[in-house]
Each structure stands twice: as structure tokens, then as C-alpha cells.
Image: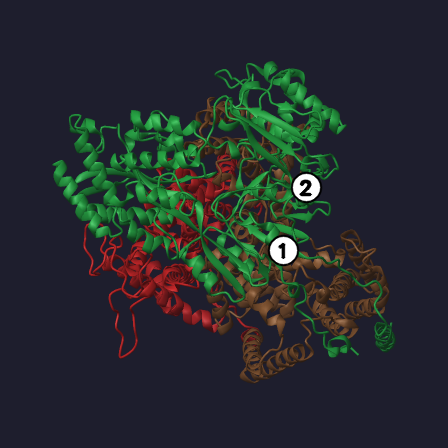
Chain colours: A green, B red, C brown
């Protein structure tokens, strides 16, 4: 072929292409739009059943709070708010202590089956251990020796002290709306013991036994528990434990039935989870946003950047001084320091022949007590607050109670009377007092204290440094026992004398922390033992009157401070941040934290149309 | 034998005849000098490498003298563990250029609890350099021994050593760091460096093996063999110097990557731990301070980049100096001029 | 050959077996699944500890647990994989791998291809311009990039590449100062690359700076970035440039037949521009169609080259096929650009198209083109972050390698017999210089997977690295073992491939032993 010919061909082709391109291009792309918000979170959802030990995580609880209706929730002041649109519960008899739950008619699961008393019944039954007849056992070589029993047997991997306090099978009314529980003895936290189950009762039975009629399925569930039918309970327990775990949207809709404001519509593994509003939902606070997406990102700074870039509308990442400063520097967002559910504290060991054990002073209990008090006084709480906590949460306060979260209804009354005023707000004053106490005790200084804390956690490392300097002024020589595996070391009390770590609260009831203080309690690492203390706790456990509870707590904490048991320092500071377009951001120290008021969320509609102008004409015609 | 090996010796010779003017001048320059002197002279002429060497020595001196080394005290007033009153709000650096340079109390600034950042950075530099040198030396040595044995003896030994190398390559380095952290409750710099050396030597081994496989087919090796030289002598006297270019390049990349590896491990929480510091651990600890308290992040970052750059440039200079084959490519014009 | 492969596979299996055992034992020492329970305040803690010990067989020796794990893993050979389950989420490891592997593979494969292409090109350019300003500049830049910690790079990329660029898009006007600055830099870089005498440099500088300035001004003035497109004219111009470039490298411009066949292919592509818009309709468009069209393009290129005939048919065919695929890609890119405006102004994207986290925009319900665009906007930053990790070493190795080769006698011989410099470089030097690089690639894949751990975390990309690191965080051994088995297998396979490639490139090596 000659070049000229090619040139001619090329010219023809090019010009015809030009002419044709002036026409409208065929088959343009289109998009579907709706109102939505995106929330950043650090861990992905993985189980619809957050009652099993596997599924018990904030990542699951948050989503379930959106998709599952509740009989009560905590509001901003940590008061228990009843959701009477769903149903009611009340104590109908004091002796025996009897509580009746009534579900209104109308609430349904997202497959249309009604939500009723059987779902509350399941919440209790699965967490009550009386049917767990077989735990797996292994021989020395790791072979399952009781495989057959386990195969046939019943084991619900869920347990709660509250559910175990009810051993009698509850009665369910004929219409299925009411269930009545009889407690073995009164219980102070009865109000928060039960909810509707996160897994629908009929769906559980359907998955386990293939019974697809909801009414029949529920009856079969009840009968199985009431009559201890192992053939049914075995499969049901295995389905309960294993079948509702998933990390992307399952094909089987029964696995993620919703009873609440939202229903799960998309779940991309490790990336995001989307829930959409249910049109028929009216048995609880109703949502304004059509679609909520929770996006997952572990790195706190990445979350902040994503917020800045508009990929998420609200975040609550792990807080640090610099993250807060970074957020300060971003335009178009707001942020707020928050108090989280975990509180930091220093504990001492009573029974390891160390500096805080009376055995080291020939059994002189008083000397040991003075040394303990002196040591706890030497913890520079004001300096820790100022340097490590307030830069994150401006309004953070020192925690002065072992049992109550600052801001909880009874916190003020408690701290005014619990003896926490022995600790001044001035570190120097505390140190002077500590020096006096040490002199009074008459021990040789410096006293060596092996100090355990979590290594790799910058805030704990900094706290150790501050405590170490302050304690050395008083007469204590802190020996660094920082350990990455500090959790495992807690129980090995011969290897340390004092420790710094956090306790997490899951509800506002003091009963929660009983095991920290009573003789032989599983969380009483220090080996503290006091008959009076044990008696108070026994009394508190069965008391249902809030006034009496506060009275008891005052006495308990007074004693704890007097004995130099431990010193609480601060509530872990958190941070939440949201875009200006996002309205209704709020948080509480307990699960589900920033999700607690999702029905108040709203988004500025202008957010959707940031580019309002038409593209420039030249851009369309530049090739002509 | 399973691995492919060169079947025919390389036809090119090493000692190029004097062909063009440039070469002639170069040869005249080095006439009558020992190998070491030639290398030194060439290295000194490499501007980038000289600047880098000078900078690295300065950094080493600064780091060791300022806060001292072990029991020897340094000239800097703060130790890296002491908590000092915070001078500027937020701990901002006190260095100032108004009315002449004045350092102030904490020229590099202070951290959360008032520690002096200059002292921290110096301590971090010491530890990071230590890690870097140990890994550079130990990993290179292991790699060279493994690689040269495999490449020289071939056969069964080669097979065995290379499969072992493959095995080590497959174990993620981060896992080794994590396990070390768990076993000794946070690694000491020397422990960390030694442990990392045992997993980072693989690339060196493979390169040296490749080099030896081709070198052993060369005439001068045959000559040495015929002359009755022992295996050890042939390997380390005759072949190793010829592989030195590859080794140096790899060793410098290895050292630069060692410092970065330590940084990455720190990011994931598996590096050198509190109360000791390394540069990686510092910038990781304060990575969120990136834009808010830049002195906490940029000073250690600057030192990491500076050290890595220096090492790389020195390596570059050494390679040019060691390798007699590395010369300017004769340009087209110089070729055509000669006709 | 087959015997070689068989033996390699066998020995690799032994290697993997040994490595898994070592890793399993190390993990059993390092991880303590009971750790969180010791710190738990649950009243039934003892019970929980007991049940977890039972669940994970912690009371049996680790070596025996390894054998049990191996038994499950061996099932993979007969198609019944059981790599255990994650005790934290109760999910099976094979399912986790099923979603994690493709994510990381996308990230790493794009990054590795780009890193090799860029690194080798820059390395070769800098070797050919040894000891010039350009060479020193490249050396310095590559060392700096190599020395930057990867999370640092990632943070910078997010600040400038995402936040900065997205802010800029709100009002995409480039200031005259910026235009002048960028053009100046562009001109300097180009004159350094092209080199030559002062006069030639000056001309190059002016042309390059002028072209850059003109392009930037055009982009700024027309708001091109808000609604970009190429159109047939730009495709034609770029296509002709590609035709000349490809021919120059593969056959030499003196080979007129090769040049003509490449140009014909460009004309053909232009002629098909409009018809292709129909083929690209959302209703038909899919990844499969794209691959099919690429194959068709390559085929027609071969055909055109063959039709031009001549003694060096092969060269024409090859050049035309490469040109055809590249021009086809241009047309597809042009189509992709058409959805840019729709995509970036959708409510989910909100005018901020470049993403900083994740691998897709949630709830975006679009067609093939929009999804492709979405993948691109999420892939671009992490890929750049990964590229920078390995770019430096490719530059250094390819530079060193080419320098070495260029000083070999056979290059001198080739020049002496009067071959043009292009032929000497491309035919004689280039191929031989690539051989040592082949040993770097598999190790680099390992490095990238290692580097991807941090990159994935920062960009919230849910892949293998995330699986590994969350496993470590939560003391969950099985996912780590799953990660390890896959990465280890990839390395082993990559090594075998490298040996074969080595043999293909270097005629002195035979795969027989």
C-alpha cells in the first residue's frame, strides 16, 4: 500500500469519526440515589448473635442495636428508658420475686412473623446454663473423648448471672404476648436482665430443625426447653452457637432477620455494612435516615482522613492527643471529647509477701495499711489528668468512685460520702500526706514496689513514668514490670506488687463488679478479704431499692479507701467527630456508644449535591 | 541437581584491553597501586558517597557523644528518660533563629510528659544504628557463607541450602518480630537485630549464589584450581572479591531496609519497646502528631531518612569503587570519533 | 522439563511443610488466646477460660495440634480444604481467604506491574545518562523514596492525593504561577533525559515547557478535570505517537512496512471509535467483553502486519498488535472518562472522587463503567504507596545491571560492526540486563505482601494483610496460618516460574539437571 493511500484513508476515517462523535453517545451510564449516612468503626460485624461468647463484641452490638428492637435502652444520662411501644415489664410479686414481660401486638420480624414473648423467653433460656449437659472433653492427645455425647448433647455457648438467677421455667400466656419469670431470689439489676433475643426464636428453630411455620416453631422451642427434649435442644444449641456468624451478607435471609428500625441490606466483607430503614417499623423511636452504612477502618488517623474526605459522616476512633489536634485542624467538622466505659485504676496486692502484705511486717495489719495508703496517695492523679487525659477530653474529671461512672445518677451522692476526700486535688499535698503516713508506719525507705502495666500502650507507659517519679519523692522505688502480656500476668500476683489497668463496665449496676471485691472473687487479684465487705455485697446482690444500693455502696467504698484497696484515676477519654452536615451526634459511655440515639441522626440534604453547576460547555465540545 | 546452572562459561573476559583514551588514562592513574588504594581513591572521587560518609560519621558522633554511650556520659544536659517541666505550650521546640541562633532548653521540643526530644532522638539514633549495623554485618555474613557454599559446591549441598533459604523466605519477618516480642516481653535492640538477621539474609544468599555459579566457570577460577588452590582459597581469595559489587549493593540495601523494617515492626507494635526508644518506635508513637506536633514526628523521621540515604549513597560509591567494570559507557560520539 | 518441574514441586512441598511446622510452633508460643479472659471482669470467667481451652485444645501439646491442623490442610489436596476456623469470629479460614486473597492480589498485581515498568524504564534511562544531572536526580529520588517509611508515604498521599486533589476539584483552576512552575520543572526534566549539546537541551527545554504549559492551561480553562474526555482527535494524535514509538523500539523507523502497519491499525481504531461506543453500552459492557476486545484488537494487529508482508513480517505483526491493543485501551479509557462527572457528583461520592479508605463506595449502584471508575478511585492511592516501596530497588538494579552489560565485549562488538545504537541497546543490552532482575521479582512479591500489611491497614483495604494482622492482634492462630500457607505457596510457585523464565531469557541455562 502506498503512503498516500493510507493518508487518504486516515483522513476519511478521522473526519467521519468526528462527524459521528457530534451525535449523542449511545447508552450513557446512570445512578440511583437516596439519603444516607456513613459511620466509621474500627472492627467489622461478624455475628448476629451477640449473646454467645464468640459474638459478644461492640462491633456486633452496634449493628444489632440498629436492626433489633429493645425493651429498654440507656439515654444520655445513663438512665434506663423503657420502650413501651414495644412492650412493658414489671415486678408483679415481691416474694417470690416475679417479673412479667408483655409484648404489644404489632411488632414483627422482617420476614413478617410476629415478635412476641417467645423471643424474650429464648433470651433467657439460651443464657441459662441448666440445659448445658455436655461440655466437650479431650484426652491427653487432644482427641475428643465424648464426641457422641457432644454430638447429641446440648451446649449453649451463652451464660449470664442474671439468667441463671431464674431457674423455674417461665409461663407464657396463650396469646403468646406475655411471659412471667420467677427469680430464685430478688436481684438488684433485674431490670436489665432480659430483652428480646437478637436471633428470632422461629428462625432459630427453622435453621436448626427445619420447622418453617413460625407458630409451630415457637411452641416447639418452648416445649423443648420446658420438657428438656435433647433431640431438639442439641441441634438448636448448635445452631445458636455457630450458624449466625457471618462476615458478609448471607444468602439465607433467616440469619439476619430484623425486628427494629433497620434491616441489613449489604455487607461487604471487611469493608462496610449497610442497613436500610424498615417502612413498617413503629414500635420504637423511628429513624429519619433511609440508609446507614458502617464503614470499617482500624487506623484512627485513617478514620479522621476519611471524615475529612467526606467518606464517613461520624467517627469515634481510638483517641490520642494528636488525633484531637488533627481534628481541630480540619475544616467542616466538629468533634467532642467523650468518656468511655473503661476506667483506669491502680491496685495493690495483699497476699504476696510484698510491701503491701501484712505478712511482710510480721502480721502487723496496721503498718501494711499505712504503706498501702501512702502508696496510693503518691499516685499523681492531677498531673496524669492534666498531661494525659484533658488534652483529649477537656472536661474530663478524676474518678472518685470504685463502682459508679462519673455522670451516673448516683455518682455525686456517692463521692461526697465515700471517703474519697482523703485524696486531695493537689498532688503535692497528697505526697506530703503520704510521707507522713510512711513515717507513721515506720518502714525503711525506699520501699521497692514491682509495678505491672501494659507495655506498648503509650498512655500507660507515660502514666508509669509519672507515677514512678512522684512515688520516688514519697519513698517508693518503682520497679518496671511493664509487660505486653500484662493481662495474663494479672493472676500471677507473686510477680508484682501493684498494677495499673482498666475495668470495663457493661451496665450501670454495681452488682457487675462484685467479683472485684469479695473474698475469692475471680477479679479480686489482690487477695483482699474482709468479712464485712462480703456481707455488704451479699446484701447488695438481692436488694432492688436504688436508695439502699447507694447507701451500701457508700459503706463499701469507704471501707475500700480506708483499707487502701485501690485508687481509681480516670474514665478512658474518647473522641467523636462528625461533619457539619451531620446532625444528632451524641454518645454514652456504655454500649452502643455513638449509636445510642440513631433515630435523632439527620443529614443536611445539601450534602448530596455539592456540584450544582453544569459542566462548562467547552468541556463538551473541546474536540470539535 | 535441580537448579539451573550456566552450562557454558561466559565468553567475555575481565581485563579489557586498553582501547580508548579514557580507559588508558584511568589505568595510568591506578598503575602500581594496590587494590585497596585503588578502591579508596575511586571512592574518594565519588562526590555523593563522600558527602554521605561524612554525614553518617557526623550522625554517629553526634548520637554517641551527646547523651553518652552506656556508662560514658555525654555533653547533653538531659537524659532520654528524665521528665522535665514543659517549657513551651504543647512542648514546642525552643530553638529560635531570632537574633542569632539560640537553642534554648529543649531545641527539638518535648513530648507528652516533658521528655526532651533531642535526647530521645539521639537515643533512638543509637539504637537504630546498632540494629542496622548488626543486621548489615550478621545477615550479610550468613548470606555470603550460604550463597558461596551453595554456588561453589553446587549439587546436593546447593540443593539443601537453597531449599533451606526458600523455607526462611516463606516465614514472614513480622511474625518473627511478633514472636520475639511475646517471648522476651519486648526485644532488646541487640536481640531484635540478631533475630532479624536470621531471616533477612536470604536475598544476599541467592545473589551470591548466582554470582558464584557464573564465576566458577570463569578462566581465572580454572587457573586457580589448576594451580592447586584449596576450595577455601578459591572461594574467598579469588571469587569473593569478584562478587563484591553485588554484595556491597545488596548489603547497603539490606542495611537501609533494616532500619525501615524496624520502623514497620514498631508501627505494628513489635519493635523496640518502652522504656527504650528507637527512631522507628518514636515516629510510630507520634505518627498522629504528623501535622499537629510536627517536632515529635519529623525529627526522628529526618534522622531515619538521613541515615538510610547516607547508607545507600555510600553503597553506591563503594560499588563504583570496587567494581573495575563499572565505568562510563563510551558514548556514541567517542566511538564514532575513533572510527 | 517435566522431571525438573516434578522435582521442584516435591522439594517445594517439603519446604512448605517444614516452614508451616516452624511457624505453627512459633505461633503457639507467641499467641495466648486466653489473654483477654485473664483481664475480663465477667463473673463466669473461669468457665469461659475452661471452655476456650477446650475449644482450642490448648491443653494438648502444640506439635499434636499441628498434626491435627495438617490433617485438615492436607484435605486441600483432595479438594476438601479445612484450614480451621477463626475462634474470634467463628468463620472458616478458607472463607476468609476467599475474600481476602482477591483484594490483596488486585492491589499487589497492579502495583508490581507498574513498579517494574516504571522502575526499569527510569533505571535504564538513568544508566544511559550515567553521571548526568538526571542520573544523580534519579538516584537521589529513588533513595529518598526507599528511605521513607510506608505509612508516612501513605499519610502524605492521602493529604495531597485525596484531600488536596478533591478540594482542588471543587474549583479546578490552576493558577498561572503553578502552570509556570510545573512547566519549568517539566522542561528541566525532559532536557535532562534527552541530553545532548547545550543547543539541543535548550530546544528540548523550550518545547517541553511550552507543551506542558499549553496542556495545563487547556485543562484549567476548560474545566477538563470535571468532565474529562479524549475524543477521536486526541486518540488519533496519541495513537500516531504510539505507532511511531512502538515501531521505533521494536523494528526501527527505517522499517517502513512496520511503521505503515502500525499507522493503519491506528486509523482502523479511529474508524471503529463510534461503533465501539455501542459495544461499550452499560447493557453489554463487562470485564469479559474488554478482554475479548483486547484479543480481537491484538488479532487484527497481527493480521494487518501480516498483510503488509515483507521479509520481516514478524516485526510488523508484533508492532501492529501492540499498537492495536494500546489504541483500543485509549478508546476504553475515553469511555470510562465519560462517567467521571456522573460518578463524582453522585450523592455517595459527594464531589470527592479520590477515596482514602476501602476498596469500593458503599451503596453505589452503577453499571460496569461506574464500578470500574469506583475501583480505580479506590485503587489509585494504595497502589502508589505500594509502588514506592519497590520502585527504588528496580531502578537501582536495572541501572546497575544495564551499566554492567553495556561494558561487555559483545556490546562493543555490536557497535563496532556498525549497528545503530537503538538496536544495540534494545536487542543486545536490554535483554541481558533483564536477567538478573528476574531473581528480584519473586522476593519483591514477598516484600509487597509484607508491605501490603501496613498499606492495607492505613487504606482500610480488607485483604491478606488485614487478616494476618488482626489474627496477631486477637491471638487467633488459624487465620495467620492461612495467610502463611497462601503467601508461602505463592513464593514457592514464583520461584519455580523465575527459574523457567531465567532459562528462557538466558540461553546459557538449560532446565534439565
Mark 2 chain: A
Q: Nearer the viewer, mark 2 or mark 1?
A: 1
* Residue at the (43%, 36%) spot, across then down: A546
Question: At numbered mark 2, what does the secondary structure look like: helix, strand or loop?
Answer: loop
Most foreground residue, A544 or A227: A544
Count of numbered marks: 2
Most foreground residue, A310 or A219: A219
Horizontally, residue A312 falls left or right of residue A104, namely left
Horizontally, residue B6 falls left or right of residue B75, namely right
Mark 1 chain: A
**Badge 1: few (under 14), some or many (20 or more) residues near its Cα, within 10 Å?**
many
Q: Position of residue C484 (x, y in %)?
A: 54, 38
Horizontally, residue B259 falls left or right of residue A434, namely right
**Badge 2: few (under 14), some or many (20 or more) residues near its Cα, within 10 Å?**
some
Q: Which residue is mark 1?
A: A37
Q: Where is residue B83, by image quadrant?
A: bottom left
Most foreground residue, A17 or A325: A325
In contact (CB < 8 Å): disc 2 and disc 1: no
Q: Position of residue A106 (x, y in %)?
A: 72, 38
Q: Which residue is mark 2?
A: A249
Q: Position of residue C260 (x, y in %)?
A: 80, 70
Classify the position of the C terminus of chain C by image quarter: top right
Whether residue B11 is visible to the viewer of this picture, yes or no, is no
Question: At numbered mark 1, what does the secondary structure look like: helix, strand or loop?
Answer: strand
Question: Does C389 sit above or below residue B166?
Answer: below
Classify the position of the N terminus of chain C by image quarter: top right
Whether residue C258 is visible to the viewer of this picture, yes or no, is yes
Horizontally, residue C309 falls left or right of residue C238, namely right
Question: Does A428 sit above or below residue C138?
Answer: above
Q: CA distance from mark 2 to mark 1?
A: 19 Å
Q: Where is residue A366, by image quadrant?
A: top left
Amino acid at each position: 500500500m502506498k503512503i498516500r493511500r493510507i493518508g487518504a484513508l486516515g483522513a476519511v476515517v478521522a473526519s467521519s469519526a468526528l462527524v459521528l462523535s457530534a451525535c449523542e453517545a449511545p447508552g450513557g451510564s446512570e445512578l440511583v440515589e437516596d439519603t444516607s449516612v456513613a459511620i466509621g468503626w474500627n472492627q467489622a460485624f461478624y455475628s448476629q448473635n451477640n449473646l454467645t461468647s464468640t459474638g459478644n463484641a461492640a462491633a456486633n452490638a452496634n449493628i444489632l442495636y440498629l436492626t433489633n428492637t429493645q425493651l429498654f435502652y440507656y439515654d444520655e444520662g445513663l438512665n434506663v428508658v423503657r420502650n413501651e411501644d414495644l412492650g412493658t415489664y414489671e415486678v408483679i410479686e415481691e416474694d417470690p420475686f416475679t417479673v412479667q414481660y408483655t409484648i404489644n401486638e404489632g411488632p414483627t420480624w422482617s420476614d413478617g412473623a410476629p415478635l412476641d414473648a417467645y423471643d424474650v423467653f429464648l433470651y433467657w433460656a439460651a443464657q441459662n446454663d441448666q440445659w448445658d449437659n455436655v461440655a466437650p472433653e479431650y484426652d491427653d492427645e487432644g482427641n475428643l473423648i465424648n464426641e457422641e455425647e457432644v454430638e447429641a448433647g446440648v451446649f449453649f455457648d451463652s451464660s449470664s448471672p442474671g439468667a441463671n438467677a431464674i431457674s423455674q421455667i417461665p409461663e407464657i400466656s396463650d396469646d403468646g404476648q406475655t411471659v412471667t419469670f420467677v427469680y430464685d431470689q430478688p436481684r438488684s439489676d433485674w431490670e436489665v436482665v432480659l430483652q428480646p433475643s437478637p436471633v428470632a426464636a422461629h428462625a432459630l428453630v427453622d435453621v436448626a430443625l427445619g420447622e418453617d411455620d413460625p407458630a409451630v416453631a415457637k411452641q416447639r422451642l418452648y416445649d423443648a426447653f420446658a420438657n428438656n427434649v435433647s433431640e431438639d435442644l442439641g441441634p438448636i444449641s448448635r445452631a445458636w452457637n455457630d450458624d449466625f456468624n457471618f462476615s458478609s451478607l448471607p444468602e439465607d435471609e433467616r440469619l439476619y432477620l430484623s425486628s427494629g428500625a433497620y434491616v441489613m441490606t449489604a455487607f461487604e466483607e471487611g469493608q462496610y455494612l449497610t442497613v436500610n430503614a424498615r417502612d413498617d417499623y413503629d414500635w420504637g423511636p423511628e429513624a429519619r435516615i433511609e440508609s446507614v452504612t458502617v464503614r470499617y477502618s482500624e487506623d484512627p488517623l485513617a478514620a479522621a482522613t476519611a471524615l475529612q474526605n467526606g467518606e464517613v459522616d461520624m467517627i469515634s476512633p481510638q483517641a490520642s492527643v494528636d488525633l484531637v489536634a488533627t481534628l481541630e485542624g480540619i475544616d467542616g467538622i466538629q468533634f467532642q471529647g467523650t468518656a468511655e466505659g473503661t476506667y483506669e485504676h491502680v491496685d495493690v496486692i495483699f497476699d504476696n509477701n510484698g510491701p503491701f502484705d501484712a505478712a511482710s511486717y510480721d502480721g502487723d495489719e496496721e503498718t501494711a495499711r499505712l504503706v498501702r495508703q501512702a502508696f496510693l496517695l503518691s499516685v499523681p492523679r492531677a498531673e496524669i489528668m492534666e498531661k494525659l487525659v484533658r488534652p483529649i477530653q477537656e472536661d474530663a474529671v478524676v474518678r472518685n468512685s470504685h463502682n459508679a461512672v462519673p455522670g451516673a445518677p448516683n455518682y455525686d451522692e456517692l463521692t461526697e460520702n465515700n471517703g474519697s476526700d482523703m485524696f486531695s486535688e493537689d498532688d503535692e499535698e497528697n505526697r506530703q500526706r503520704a510521707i507522713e503516713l510512711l513515717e507513721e508506719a515506720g518502714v525503711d525507705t525506699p520501699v521497692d514496689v514491682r509495678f505491672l502495666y501494659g507495655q506498648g500502650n503509650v498512655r500507660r507507659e507515660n502514666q508509669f513514668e509519672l507515677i514512678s517519679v512522684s512515688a520516688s519523692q514519697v519513698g517508693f522505688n518503682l520497679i518496671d514490670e511493664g509487660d505486653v502480656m500484662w493481662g495474663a500476668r494479672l493472676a500471677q500476683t507473686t510477680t508484682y506488687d501493684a498494677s495499673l489497668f482498666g475495668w470495663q463496665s457493661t451496665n450501670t449496676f454495681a452488682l457487675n463488679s462484685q467479683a472485684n471485691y469479695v473474698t475469692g472473687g475471680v477479679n479480686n487479684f489482690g487477695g483482699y478479704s474482709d468479712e464485712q465487705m462480703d456481707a455488704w455485697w451479699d446484701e447488695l446482690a438481692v436488694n432492688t431499692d436504688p436508695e439502699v444500693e447507694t447507701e451500701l455502696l457508700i459503706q463499701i467504698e469507704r471501707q475500700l479507701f480506708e483499707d487502701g484497696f485501690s485508687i481509681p484515676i480516670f474514665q478512658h477519654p474518647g473522641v467523636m467527630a462528625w461533619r457539619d452536615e451531620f446532625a444528632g451526634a451524641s454518645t454514652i459511655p456504655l454500649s452502643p456508644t455513638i449509636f445510642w440515639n440513631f433515630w435523632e441522626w439527620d443529614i443536611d440534604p445539601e450534602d448530596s449535591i455539592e456540584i450544582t453547576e453544569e459542566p462548562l460547555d467547552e468541556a463538551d465540545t473541546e474536540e470539535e | 541437581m535441580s537448579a539451573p546452572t550456566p552450562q557454558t562459561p561466559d565468553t567475555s573476559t575481565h581485563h579489557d584491553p586498553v582501547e580508548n583514551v579514557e580507559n588508558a588514562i584511568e589505568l595510568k592513574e591506578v598503575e602500581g597501586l594496590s587494590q585497596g588504594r585503588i578502591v579508596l581513591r575511586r571512592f574518594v572521587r565519588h562526590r555523593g558517597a563522600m558527602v554521605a560518609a561524612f554525614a553518617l560519621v557526623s550522625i554517629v558522633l553526634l548520637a554517641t557523644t551527646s547523651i553518652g554511650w552506656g556508662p560514658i556520659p555525654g555533653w547533653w544536659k538531659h537524659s532520654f528518660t528524665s521528665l522535665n517541666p514543659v517549657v513551651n505550650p504543647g512542648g514546642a521546640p525552643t530553638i529560635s533563629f531570632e537574633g542569632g541562633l539560640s537553642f534554648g532548653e529543649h531545641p527539638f521540643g518535648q513530648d507528652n510528659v516533658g521528655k526532651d526530644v533531642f535526647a530521645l532522638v539521639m537515643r533512638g539514633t543509637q539504637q537504630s544504628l546498632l540494629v542496622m549495623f548488626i543486621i548489615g554485618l550478621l545477615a550479610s555474613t550468613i548470606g555470603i557463607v550460604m550463597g558461596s557454599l551453595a554456588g561453589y559446591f553446587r549439587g546436593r549441598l546447593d540443593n539443601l541450602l537453597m531449599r533451606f533459604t526458600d523455607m526462611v523466605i516463606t516465614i514472614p519477618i513480622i511474625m518473627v518480630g511478633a514472636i520475639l516480642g511475646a517471648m522476651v516481653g519486648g526485644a532488646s535492640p541487640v536481640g531484635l537485630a540478631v533475630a532479624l538477621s536470621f531471616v533477612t539474609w536470604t536475598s544476599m544468599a541467592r545473589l551470591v549464589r548466582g554470582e558464584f555459579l557464573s564465576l566458577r566457570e570463569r578462566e581465572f577460577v580454572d587457573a586457580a584450581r589448576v594451580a592447586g588452590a584449596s576450595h577455601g582459597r578459591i572461594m574467598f581469595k579469588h571469587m569473593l572479591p569478584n562478587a563484591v559489587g553485588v554484595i556491597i549493593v545488596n548489603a547497603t540495601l539490606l542495611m537501609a531496609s533494616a532500619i525501615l523494617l524496624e520502623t514497620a515492626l514498631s508501627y505494628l507494635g513489635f519493635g523496640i519497646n518502652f522504656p527504650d526508644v528507637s527512631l522507628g518506635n518514636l515516629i510510630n508513637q507520634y505518627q498522629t502528631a504528623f501535622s499537629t506536633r510536627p517536632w515529635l514526628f519529623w525529627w526522628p523521621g529526618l534522622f531515619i531518612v538521613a541515615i538510610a540515604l547516607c547508607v545507600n549513597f555510600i553503597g553506591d560509591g563503594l560499588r563504583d569503587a570496587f567494581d573495575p567494570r563499572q565505568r562510563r559507557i563510551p558514548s556514541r560520539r567517542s566511538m564514532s570519533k575513533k572510527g | 522439563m517435566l522431571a525438573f518441574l516434578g522435582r521442584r514441586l516435591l522439594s517445594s512441598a517439603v519446604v512448605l511443610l517444614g516452614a508451616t511446622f516452624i511457624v505453627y510452633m512459633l505461633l503457639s508460643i507467641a499467641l495466648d488466646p486466653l489473654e483477654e479472659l485473664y483481664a475480663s471482669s465477667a463473673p463466669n470467667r473461669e468457665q469461659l477460660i475452661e471452655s476456650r481451652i477446650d475449644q482450642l485444645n490448648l491443653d494438648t501439646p502444640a506439635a499434636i495440634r499441628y498434626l491435627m491442623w495438617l490433617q485438615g490442610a492436607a484435605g486441600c489436596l483432595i479438594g476438601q480444604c479445612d484450614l480451621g476456623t477463626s475462634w474470634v469470629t467463628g468463620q472458616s479460614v478458607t472463607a476468609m481467604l476467599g475474600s481476602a486473597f482477591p483484594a490483596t492480589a488486585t492491589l499487589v498485581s497492579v502495583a508490581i506491574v507498574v513498579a517494574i515498568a516504571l522502575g526499569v524504564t527510569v533505571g535504564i534511562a538513568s544508566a544511559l545518562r550515567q553521571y548526568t544531572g538526571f542520573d544523580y536526580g534519579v538516584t537521589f529520588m529513588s533513595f529518598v523514596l526507599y528511605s521513607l517509611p510506608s505509612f508516612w508515604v501513605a499519610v502524605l498521599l492521602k493529604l495531597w492525593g485525596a484531600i488536596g486533589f478533591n478540594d482542588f476539584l471543587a474549583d479546578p483552576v490552576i493558577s498561572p504561577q503553578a502552570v509556570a512552575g510545573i512547566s519549568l520543572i517539566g522542561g528541566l526534566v525532559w532536557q535532562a533525559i534527552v541530553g545532548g549539546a547545550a543547543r539541543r537541551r535548550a530546544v528540548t527545554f523550550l518545547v517541553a515547557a511550552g507543551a506542558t504549559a499549553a496542556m495545563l492551561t487547556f485543562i484549567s480553562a476548560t474545566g477538563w478535570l470535571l468532565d474529562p474526555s479524549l475524543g477521536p482527535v486526541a486518540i488519533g494524535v496519541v495513537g500516531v505517537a504510539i505507532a511511531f514509538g512502538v515501531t521505533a523500539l521494536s523494528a526501527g523507523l527505517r522499517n517502513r512496512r512496520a511503521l505503515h502497519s502500525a499507522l493503519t491499525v491506528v486509523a482502523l481504531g479511529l474508524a471503529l471509535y463510534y461503533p465501539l461506543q455501542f459495544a461499550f453500552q452499560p447493557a453489554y459492557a463487562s470485564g469479559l467483553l474488554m478482554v475479548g476486545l483486547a484479543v480481537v484488537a491484538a488479532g487484527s494487529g497481527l493480521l494487518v502486519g501480516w498483510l503488509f508482508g515483507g521479509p520481516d513480517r514478524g516485526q510488523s505483526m508484533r508492532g501492529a498488535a501492540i499498537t492495536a491493543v494500546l489504541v483500543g485501551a485509549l478508546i476504553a479509557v475515553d469511555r470510562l472518562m465519560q462517567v467521571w462527572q456522573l460518578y463524582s457528583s453522585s450523592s455517595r461520592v459527594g464531589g470527592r472522587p479520590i477515596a482514602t479508605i476501602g476498596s469500593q463506595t458503599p451503596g453505589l449502584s452503577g453499571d460496569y463503567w461506574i464500578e470500574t471508575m469506583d475501583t480505580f478511585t479506590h485503587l489509585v492511592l494504595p497502589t502508589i504507596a505500594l509502588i514506592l516501596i519497590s520502585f527504588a530497588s528496580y531502578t537501582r538494579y536495572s541501572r546497575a545491571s544495564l551499566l554492567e552489560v553495556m561494558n561487555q565485549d559483545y556490546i562493543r562488538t555490536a557497535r563496532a560492526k556498525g549497528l545503530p545504537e537503538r538496536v544495540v541497546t534494545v536487542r543486545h543490552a536490554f535483554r541481558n540486563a533483564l536477567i538478573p532482575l528476574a531473581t528480584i521479582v519473586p522476593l519483591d512479591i514477598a516484600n509487597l505482601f509484607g508491605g501490603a500489611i501496613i498499606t492495607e491497614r492505613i487504606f482500610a483495604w480488607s485483604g491478606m494483610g488485614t487478616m494476618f494482622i488482626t489474627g496477631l492482634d486477637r491471638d487467633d492462630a488459624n487465620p495467620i496460618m492461612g495467610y502463611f500457607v497462601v503467601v508461602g505457596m505463592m513464593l514457592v510457585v514464583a520461584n519455580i516460574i523465575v527459574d523457567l523464565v531465567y532459562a528462557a531469557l538466558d540461553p546459557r541455562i538449560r532446565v534439565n539437571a
